[in-house]
Image (cartoon, rainbow, N blue to C red):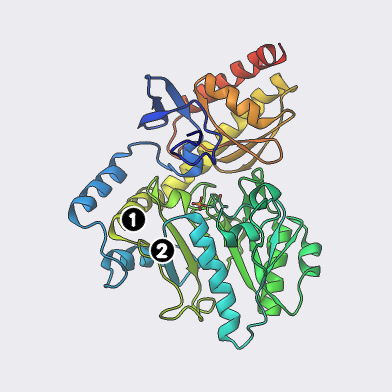
């Protein structure tokens, strides 16, 4: 048999981690890696964080799962915490980012359905967006590599240029339900939307009774230096998907909504077997215990500025490779003049993990609790790798 037991849908690298400790991963044969990928913005507090680990261990021994047939003191408590800390009035818990976005799409459609406007079912989405790998979420992007071979895709999405307010407004018609976007595009290449764009979309939603839906699966949960990125724009969505970092490594997602936006989500309209089970809630609560306070968030902003300025000082020394740094907080991207995917692959051989993204960007997504020494190690390691890079590659 030629096919591998693990369905071969990923180009898996030779890095084979078996253990983690803080900002480091260790491979099968003891190789050590500085992990500035964080499982793609998931391991917010690095590996083996004692508070998160203990919360999961204790909850696993107490009660892991019961289903949503019963009352959920654990779910109520974490939902209340999210409601207290965000724009939202209500929360649906999922196991992944794509499911959180699916719930957001359904909530937006149901809002108009409940108001007697079922014809308002289209979401306007944006170029190079990434919302997940389900049929709904691949239908919400124009990225051909995500869609190829999966037709027929779902109707109800119209893709226009990201950060182009005029294009977004021009796409609105009598079928429009709202806009779905990442305020800071992640896999598309660490592209923060402009203030003008986000404000313009909010205004259009207010004037035309449309839903503003944010996908903060990657940029949410303290990554950008505020609990959610929308806070930095001073613009609240009606519906928001959160996941990745929210469980600190435990599979957890959430769809947050205002009371108004969730008007159609009544008993029987949605569900999930695992969603919000006691084990997942314990993980989420433990992450929030650590990150949801001004001291931690201020530290993320300061660390982000230090990392960014260290990178900005180093990059000109290798200006044949690097162009610039962009992003917010500890969600940074280095725009490269060469194939970022090949360079990220090379970096792994030097014991440094980062993540490639679209637009030839290398994503730098360290754990949020890194220290000065990790910044130095990363920047020095990156610089040394850049100095050596052309030699073996050009040979
Ligand atoms: C990763 C990601 C998703 C999908 O999350 P999964 O947990 O892989 O389903 C959706 N939206 C954004 C912005 C993401 O970065």
Which residue in the protein does label 2 denote?
Answer: 93
Residue 8: x and y in percent read 52, 39
User: Helix, strand, or loop for circle 2?
Assistant: strand
Distance from Cα at disc 2 to Cα at disc 1: 9 Å
Q: Residue at x 43, y 52 (%)?
A: 246
Horizontal side of residue 191 vs 265, given as left or right: right
Residue farthest along the bottom direction in this orientation: 116
CB atoms at circles 2 and 1 under 8 Å apart?
yes
User: Helix, strand, or loop for circle 1?
Assistant: helix
Answer yes or no: is residue 176 visible.
yes
- The CB of the residue at mark 1 lies under 8 Å from ligand 1: no
Residue 181: x and y in percent read 64, 59
The answer to which quarter of the image holds residue 150 is: bottom right
Above or below: residue 140 compared with residue 290: below
Horizontal side of residue 199 vs 214, given as left or right: right
- In primary-sequence order, the first of circles 2 and 1 is 2
Residue farthest along the left direction in this orientation: 62
Above or below: residue 258 compared with residue 337: below
């Amino acid at each position: 048999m030629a096919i591998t037991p693990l369905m071969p849908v990923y180009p898996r690298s030779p890095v084979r981690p078996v253990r983690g400790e803080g900002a480091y991963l260790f491979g099968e044969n003891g190789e050590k890696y500085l992990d500035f990928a964080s499982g793609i913005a998931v391991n917010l507090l690095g590996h083996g964080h004692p508070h998160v680990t203990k919360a999961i261990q204790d909850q696993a021994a107490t009660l892991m799962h019961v289903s949503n047939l019963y009352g959920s003191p654990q779910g109520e408590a974490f939902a209340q915490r999210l409601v207290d800390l965000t724009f939202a009035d209500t929360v649906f818990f999922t196991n992944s980012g794509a499911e959180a976005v699916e719930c957001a799409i359904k909530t937006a459609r149901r809002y108009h359905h409940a108001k007697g406007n079922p014809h308002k079912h289209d979401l306007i989405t944006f170029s190079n967006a990434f919302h997940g790998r389900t049929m709904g979420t691949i239908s919400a992007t124009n990225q051909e590599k995500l869609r190829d071979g999966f037709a027929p895709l779902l109707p109800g999405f119209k893709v226009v240029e990201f950060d182009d307010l005029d294009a977004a407004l021009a796409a609105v018609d009598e079928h429009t339900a709202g806009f779905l976007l990442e305020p800071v595009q992640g896999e598309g290449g660490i592209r923060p939307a402009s203030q003008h764009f986000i404000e313009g979309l909010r205004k259009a939603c207010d004037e035309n009774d449309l839903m503003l839906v944010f996908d903060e699966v990657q940029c949410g949960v303290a990554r950008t230096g505020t609990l959610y990125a929308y806070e930095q724009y001073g613009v609240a969505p009606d519906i928001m998907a959160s996941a990745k970092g929210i469980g600190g490594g435990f599979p957890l997602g959430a769809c947050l909504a205002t009371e108004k936006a969730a008007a159609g989500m009544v008993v029987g309209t949605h569900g999930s077997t695992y969603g919000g089970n006691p084990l997942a809630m314990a993980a989420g609560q433990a992450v929030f215990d650590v990150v949801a306070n001004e001291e931690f968030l201020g530290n993320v902003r300061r660390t982000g500025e230090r990392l960014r300025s260290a990178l900005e000082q180093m990059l000109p020394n290798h200006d044949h490779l690097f162009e610039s740094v962009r992003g917010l907080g500890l969600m940074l991207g280095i725009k490269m003049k060469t194939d970022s995917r090949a360079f990220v692959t090379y970096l792994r051989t030097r014991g440094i993990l980062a993540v490639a993204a679209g637009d030839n960007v290398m994503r730098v997504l360290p754990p949020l609790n890194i220290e000065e020494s990790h910044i130095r190690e990363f920047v020095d390691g990156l610089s040394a790798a850049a100095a050596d890079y052309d030699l073996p590659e050009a040979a």
